[in-house]
Amino acid sequence: MSARHPKALAWERRLKRVFDGIDAELEAAYGDRYPLHPVRARRGRTADPAHDGLFDLGAAFSAGYGSEHGAGYIVRLRLATLARVPDSVIEEIEDFVVERLRAELPAAFPGRDLDVSRDGPVFKIHGDLSLGRV
């Protein structure tokens, strides 16, 4: 049983659906470019897209101490490969993820002022994270 607020869990389920959709787009665009890590399941082989295919995409909440953007969700992007992925390709993928998040968040969370910004070495979803309208 979770000790987390049900509205927070609902908010994160919606966010997970956004990430799962972007994960599918990434897999379609880049999934065949690099070999999977030897212990990584092929795309579509697990119940959670974050656990199979080339991409592990999601977010983790941060209270935002020391951040210019405050509290938010740190975007987590990992490529499950042992191959060297050029920095330019990683940057291209990050830009794609940020662009897709900016497009999808308003539909998933209507009426909220959410943005995606660089916060030091990571990207963060920040803005109206209130639970009152979940």
Image (cartoon, rainbow, N blue to C red):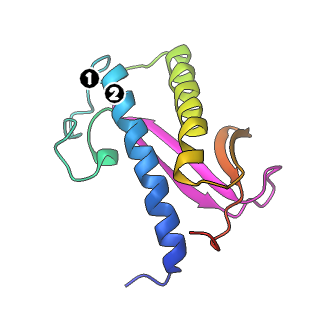
Question: What residue is disc 2 on?
Answer: 82
Question: Magenta stretch: residue 74 in it?
Answer: yes
Query: Residue 115 in the image: x percent, y percent?
Result: 69, 44
- State the residue at coordinates (31%, 20%): 34
Q: Quadrant of residue 133?
A: bottom right
Disc 2 and disc 1 in contact, CB within 8 angstroms: yes
Question: What residue is disc 1 on?
Answer: 35
Q: Residues within 10 Å of mark 1 (few under 14, many from 20)?
A: some
Q: Quadrant of residue 81?
A: top left
Q: Mark 2 belongs to which amino acid?
A: Leu
Q: Is residue 40 left or right of residue 23?
A: left
Query: Under tag 1, what secondary structure?
Result: loop
Ranked by sequence position, the earlier of labels 2 and 1 is 1
Query: Residue 83 in the image: x percent, y percent?
Result: 35, 21
Which segment is the magenta one?
56-82
- Find the distance from the CA under tag 2 to the CA under tag 1: 8 Å
Query: Under tag 2, what secondary structure?
Result: loop
In which quadrant of the rendered image does the C terminus lie? bottom right
Residue depth check, mark 2 versus mark 1: number of the one nearer the observer: 1
Query: Residue 61 in the image: x percent, y percent?
Result: 59, 60
Q: Residue furthest front?
A: 111
In which quadrant of the rendered image does the N terminus lie? bottom left
